[in-house]
Image (cartoon, helix red, strand yellow):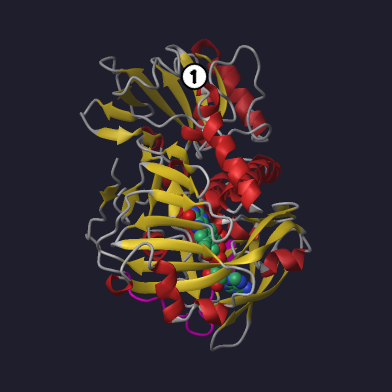
Amino acid sequence: MTATLIKKTPKTAPAAPATPPAPGTLPAHADVVIVGYGPAGAALANLLGRYGVDTLVVDKAEDILPMPRAIALDNEALRILQMAGLAEDAFEKIAIPQVRLHSPYAGEFGRVNTAGCLDGHPKLITFYQPEMEQALRSAVKQHSTVRTAVGVEMTDFMDLGHEIRLQLRPADGPAQTISCRYLVAADGSASPVRARLGVEFGGETYPQDWLIVDAKHVRSPISDVEFLCDPERPVPHMIAPGGRERWEFMMKPGETREQVLQPAFLRELLKPWANPDELEIERTAVYRFHARVADSFRKGNVFLVGDAAHITPPFVGQGMCAGLRDVANLGWKLAWVLHGRADARILDSYDRERRPHAKAMIDLARGMGLLIKPVSPVAGALSSHLVKNLRRLPPLRALIDDLKIKPRNRFKEGLFQPRNRDDRLDRGNHLPQVWLRNAAGQGAWSDDALGERLTLVGFGVDPLQALSPQEQAAWTAAGGAFVQISHRGQLGQPRPELAVWEDLTGELVPDRAPVGWLAVVRPDRVILHDGPATDAGRLVRETLSLLGLKG
Ligand SMILES: Cc1cc2nc3c(=O)[nH]c(=O)nc-3n(C[C@H](O)[C@H](O)[C@H](O)COP(=O)(O)OP(=O)(O)OC[C@H]3O[C@@H](n4cnc5c(N)ncnc54)[C@H](O)[C@@H]3O)c2cc1C
């Protein structure tokens, strides 16, 4: 199996380098201020822009961080980037077909099948983080309600309940006080906002340092991700776009930063993989990994997202993915509250929905860490042989090889109608994404067809047919839209208030969603409610009630 390169189309000129705002040009107020313009902050800025929210993003750095950090993303993260408005070719990716685990004791003992797509996106890709962040920043420019200010540090804030006052200090100007309704801390793992709130960041910091090396190497011998699980010196190694390769070397006791960053030392480390003369070392960094989760992702009107809320060892490539899940979950809720389409109490569901999953992913990474860097040679021999043998049993093989071990992003509790015996769709889970076609013959991914609204979807049925004009009006006032998705060849008649599509894949209707059934789908694609088309009025009333509105 070989990796597939998904190219970026060079259709837009690279964005001009950002410049700090001139003194005094910061707005006096924004409904939402995002502190931190890393990937989590930039993705949220795009989402809030799409929902039309008055937003200011500030970052103390003047440009994108050049450090070697995230390299892999999963299909869920790519789906969120799609929701944030990034085109499929906005940044280059390599689709990774498999992840292989080797040990000195058992040879290849694990192989995870990551080939193919889920919900319209490759299950695993590698990418170049600065290019992806640049694509997010370029996309922000389309949104007239979003302002950005780089080279501006947030130095203090006070949550007064009805508003938050913030101190912002531009690099070369006087500090300014501005106000906002909600503050989002996307300010990274050291999060000054989290520290100021006094929110605990419990967990562990690993005792070892890791040397990360990104190099350009045109003749890469691998086409996937490999983990060399040697307790002496474990090494994850992978390819990335632009002829790049990444190595992550665990440093041995006694090795120092200065020593491992010496060119001669690096050449020795890389020798087993490549002729060092054929490698152009692009970036190096030494990191210590952490597994920590904030005690709460919300305090008052302040929300933590991304590394400010959780930080994971990168063994399953999920740190940024988790941050993207945070902003997809929070963005529309802030928008609905600020637009008066929901009560502020819905914001409590952000922590309830996101924190358990973020923690579960970190637990998976910690477990994977025990395989990748066993505590001793005996533990390494035992664990690699155990996994190798367990994979001989089909149910356990699926757990490892088909990623069934990965925690599902399905909520136990939160902003959805409680599950019961009559529901046919998985409330609190995400609606699968499929390829659709409308009456004009235009194709679209179902998420794009649903757009930025709360949607009442009728599967093979007109979702409006059993609604009174008052219920329709209440739904529209709550930011609701109506969409009909039928199975192939059974397109209904579109009307101004109803978009009509056919499911070309047959994977949604009738396989997952029975004909004659309705679903209420949140803007983050989570199924909030479902029921028969005859009960449309009840679904609308119960949804409005969950949003804290009267039906
Ligand atoms: C070696 C390594 C490998 C990784 N691999 C993966 C991977 O394969 N897949 C994956 O999903 N994740 C991975 N990650 C994790 C991923 O890189 C991070 O989760 C992600 O970059 C964090 O994004 P963020 O936006 O939350 O924070 P950051 O990118 O850290 O952004 C925070 C921003 O806040 C700004 N800021 C801080 N304080 C202030 C202030 N007071 N005022 C104004 N601005 C402020 C900073 O300047 C910074 O720009 C990896 C990380 C490492 C270290």
Q: Is residue 96 left or right of residue 108?
A: left
Asked if the magenta segment contains residue 28, the reply would be yes
Residue 446 horizontal/vertical position (percent):
37, 32
On the image, the x and y values in percent for residue 14 come to: 29, 69
Give the labeled residue for mark 1.
518
Quarter of the view holding residue 181: bottom right
At 49% from the left edge and 62% from the top edge, which residue is drawn?
A: 248
> Which image quadrant: the C terminus?
top right
User: Which residue does the image show at 75% across and 55% down from the upper left?
Assistant: 300
- Relative to 174, is 86 on the left or the right? left
Q: Which residues are magenta?
A: 15-33
Q: Which residue is depicted at the point 35% across and 41% down?
A: 97
Q: Please say whether residue 228 is one of the residues in the magenta stretch.
A: no
Q: Residues within 10 Å of mark 1 (few under 14, many from 20)?
A: many
User: Could you say where residue 425 lies in the image, as x and y percent from the top left?
Assistant: 53, 20
Question: What element does badge 1 sit on?
Answer: strand
465 is higher (above) or lower (below) than 161: above
In the picture provided, is 18 more to the left or to the right than 308?
left
Q: Residue at x 77, y 59 (%)?
A: 200
Magenta segment, prevailing SS (helix, strand or loop)? loop
Residue 404 location in percent, x, y? 53, 31
Find ligand 1 in the image and state its quadrant. Answer: bottom right
Above/below status of 47 relative to 199: above
Near-viewer residue (74 or 60)? 74
Viewer-closest of 423 and 313: 313
Tell me if residue 340 can be seen: no
- What residue type is disc 1 on? Leu
